[in-house]
Image (cartoon, coloured by chain):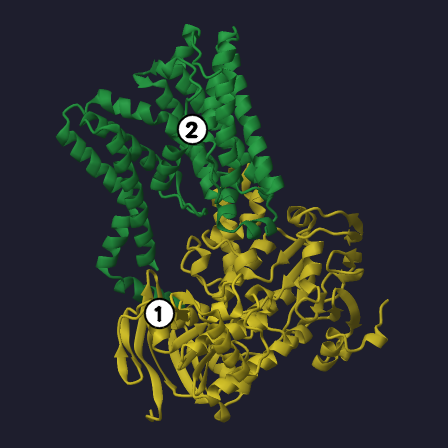
Chain colours: A yellow, B green
Amino acid sequence: MNKDNILLELNKIRKEYPGVLALDDLSLSFREGEVHAICGENGAVKSTLIKTVTGAIRPTSGEMIYAGEVVDHQSPIASMNAGISCIYQEFNLISELTVAENVFFGREIMKNGFIDYAAMQEKTREILVDLGVDIDPKQQVKELTVGFQQIVEIAKALSQNVRILIMDEPSAPLTNNELEYLFKIVKKLKSQNVTVIYISHRLEEVFELADRVSIIRDGQYISTLEIKDTNRDELIHLMVGRELGNDFPEDSCEKGDVALKVENLTTSLLKDISFDVRKGEILGLAGLVGAGRTETARAVFGADPIEKGTITLLGKEVVIKNPGDAINKGIGLIPEDRKQHGILAQLSIKKNISFSSLGTFARGLLINSKKETELTRGMKDKLRIKAPTLDVPVSSLSGGNQQKVVLSKALMTDSDVLFFDEPTRGIDVGAKQEIYRLMRDLAAEGKAIVMISSEMPELIGMSDRIMVLCEGELVKELAPEEYSQEIILEYASGGSNNEIARS
Amino acid sequence: MKSPAAETIKTADKGTLDRKKIVDGLSRFAIPIALGVLIVIFSIMSSSFLTSRNIINIFRQVSIVGICAVGMTFVILTGGIDLSVGSVIGVAVVSASSLMVAGVHPVAASIFALLIGVVLGVIIGFFINEVGVPPLITTLAFMTALRGVAYTTTKGLPVYGFPESFAFLGQGYIGGIPVPVIIMILVFIGGYILLNKTKFGRYVYGIGGNEEATRLSGINVKLTKYKIYILESFLASLAGIVLLSRVNSGQPKAGQGYEMDIITAVVLGGVSIAGGSGKITGVITGVLLMGVLTNGMILINVDEYSQWIVKGVVLLAAVSLDQMSHRTRD
């Protein structure tokens, strides 16, 4: 390895948890002022790595060399003071406070024993102007969009003279416009000689931003490559450790009768949404964040109240009062926000999988635990959930495996119609492909599937039809031969308003 | 064929440090160990502590708190809290005793008091579920108001003069074991089955861990919460009837301050105040620890005010140890 300006070096870092080896003698080095992407299959490894670098946890063995010195017994505060910060997926912002108060939280500028708001606002403004964004330091954080909140986080790091900024899946919550901002800012940071450790599953971004990319698989360091010397296929190959076939499985099944028909669905956020899905079909819902895709799924599923509209299931008009009702009638939902809405983190895999279908296992009042174990094990095997036993808590699994658990829970209820809301968000390439394959298999079994996704390639690759939503309205339905990212985006951003085709 | 995942697990198992295991084990069994230590200390300091009579005594003394602790376990597991239990005990005591004095048969009076408990549970559940008042505030309001109901019903005076047969519930024995203890044991067994073997119990854990995910899993969260507060108020009324039978006089102040003992026992038993985790078997230990502590301190002549200090310190120490164990497990 050449010694060109190495700022941070990890030397044989090893972290063990009871029953799991999260990092296996990982060695990595980061140059000053580079954007270093980290791609890997396993979510648990990624978070362990971040926590190790920021000092939130201590590795079992191994050493960390920062700016030429061995770092020992760190804490997140110590590493922040030393110039290492992390933008987590969940922001550490206090929404009731203003931008300036957040930026200087815990390090308030004082004058005569009182907080000097004017100075804090001025310094915040300087940082924000420098980043090229127009945010009022006096604004409350809760009034900002997710994209701007992320920028406040970055400003917070910059205010403490950050030298290494770790960004954990920073693009995940952003819309396309906000993404542009993020890219600009990352490039700006780089020009200021900040080292950015950019963790992402989205290879497009890695190629857009990174100088080098390191691949980690199963807790082990695989390789570090110069971006200019590699390509997408090679990265995927290294990440997965095996050749991946075609990204999206072939659709070979017959489309059956209409399984779900929704007419004039109206809620506080939706206007007259009408669509249908056939058995064996995958219907894609496209749109920007806030266009009403998730809201459509939730309204049909009975999670949000409906003002108007009819739902017809397998030819029969139904009224759905709540999610329990929807499940009983044969509608399933795999929610967008896995942590908040999908998993029951403290419960075991088994108890998660059976949670929606306990009636099936109950003999009178009591749960038949033998039958429960049997059926949930079948599901774990079928979906290839990687875990030592059925009894480990779901929180100990990687994102991809957690998603499979959420999916198993929905599948156990034997629904006819399944809504998949961002089914592959934050999961690795290998698990993504398994989810795609599974969705196709389910369609082949005669299920009707509605898929919501912000990832265009996936939406285009998987959907038999795509409906585009914009501001709570259905603006266009596209057939496969019309698919292209540009067309979808144009409709999604309301660009083709004058030729809205509605049937 | 070996998968890489299986391989890593094996390596990690081998490497787990013994020291960590010990720390982990110590904190996990902190309450049982503390209980053991207390028993040893008290039996050294007082010759009458480890007699069969005193042991039975301890069990009888904890029976009221124990019965309510089962209900409180369910409440706290969902992330809620119930401060009204003590006052529900008071209302049950006053209503059952007033009816009996008016000539109503003890069984009918008891059933009526239990029904009042159920109705109170529904009302408390209504404010939490439908109006959206947080459990802490709802039950704080009921704690105050129901105590007032108990006092106004009897004009602040105790009520007595019950049929002799009624005394069996609180003072009788079956096979040498006091009836209140038997009732408590049955309630614990019932609670264990309910929590571990039924759908209801599973949903209780689900709500405490992630209420919205539970709702989106198709579970009727409101109904489950109603059931929980009904269960707790029902058990509080049951405890009230047993208490009434034991002291043989209907005191409007009956059960006052019990909520804190009950919550302490549940928390000592390892139930997370944030909801979602905890076991009923742990709560048994928590209840016994409280009982042994109180009983032992009386035997070695610790005055009541100092007992409060000790109880406060024990609660803080137990929860601190529990917190530290979570940190080492991270």
The vertical placement of B155 against A196, above or below, is above
Q: Which residue is mark 2?
A: B187
Looking at the image, is B296 positioned above or below residue A235?
A: above
Q: Please give the count of numbered marks on the rendered protein.
A: 2
Q: Is there a contact, CB below 8 Å, between mark 1 and mark 2? A: no
Q: Nearer the viewer, residue A75 or B148?
A: B148
Q: Is residue B263 left or right of residue A358?
A: left
Q: Quadrant of the N terminus of chain A?
A: bottom left
- A182 sits left or right of A16 in the view: right
User: Is residue A91 in sight in this rendering?
Assistant: yes
Give the numbered dot on residue B50.
none
Q: Position of residue A369 (x, y in %)?
A: 48, 43
Front position among marks 1 and 2: 1
Q: Report x, y in % for residue A341.
A: 56, 56
Mark 1 to mark 2: distance in Å? Answer: 49 Å
Residue at the disc numbered 1: A77
Local SS, label 1: helix
Residue A443: x %, y % from top left: 68, 63
Around disc 2, counting alpha carbons within 10 Å, would you say few (fewer than 14), some (14 to 19), or many (20 or more)? Answer: some
